[in-house]
Amino acid sequence: RYPLVTGVQTCALPIFCATWCTIPNMLTSIGLTHVALILFLAFLGGLFLQRFRQPALVGYILVGIMIGPGLLGLQGNDETITWLAELAVVLLMFMIGLELDIARFRESMTVALTVTGLQIALSLGVMFGLSSFLFHWNVPQTVLFGFIASLSSTAVAMTILREIGRDKAET
């Protein structure tokens, strides 16, 4: 039925295998209607905020908060969300590969690496500060949350820059 995806041996990349080789099994265990409903609600949230000249990403986040276990509890932490998250990461990496201009990246690599290092250091510093005064996390938790904050802020910033057409601006 899926001749190109028969197992780990035929897949070129481990992340490809981890997500895509399990799709036929996952689609039988989760309802496509459920996935479609989640995506449709996210679309509506993005569309609603765009009408007020706000980034669609903010609408996606707000819908996630509303339907998630923290507020309305319509969607718990189950394998549907795990599957969607893995798919999103694979698609994000694919989009980065499609949009990456190697020559342009080489020109701005020093600046990009410096800014990335500073962003990670700042995120870790903020998380260690919050951990010391508010949350009292242990060191591994603090480092994890620091990296999560660093990476998610980059994804949010790039999405917003892409929406306003400034992602291809000269550096």
Image (cartoon, helix red, strand yellow):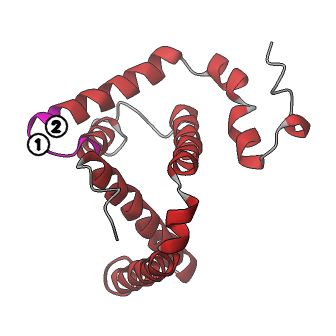
Q: Position of residue 151 (x, y in %)?
A: 46, 64
Label 1 belongs to which residue? 53
Quarter of the figure with residue 90: top right
> In the figure, 76 relative to 4: above or below?
below
Label 2 belongs to which residue? 50
Is 120 one of the magenta-colored residues? no
- Name the dominant secondary structure of the magenta segment: helix
Gap between marks 1 and 2 measured at Cα? 5 Å
Q: Amino acid at mark 1?
A: Arg
Checking the image for residue 28, the label placed there is none
Q: Which residues are magenta?
A: 48-57
Q: Nearer the viewer, residue 102 or 50?
A: 102
In this picture, residue 149 sits left or right of residue 63: right
Q: Are marks 1 and 2 in contact (CB under 8 Å)?
A: yes
Is 52 one of the magenta-colored residues? yes
Q: Nearer the viewer, residue 111 or 45?
A: 111
Question: Which quadrant is home to the C terminus?
Answer: bottom left
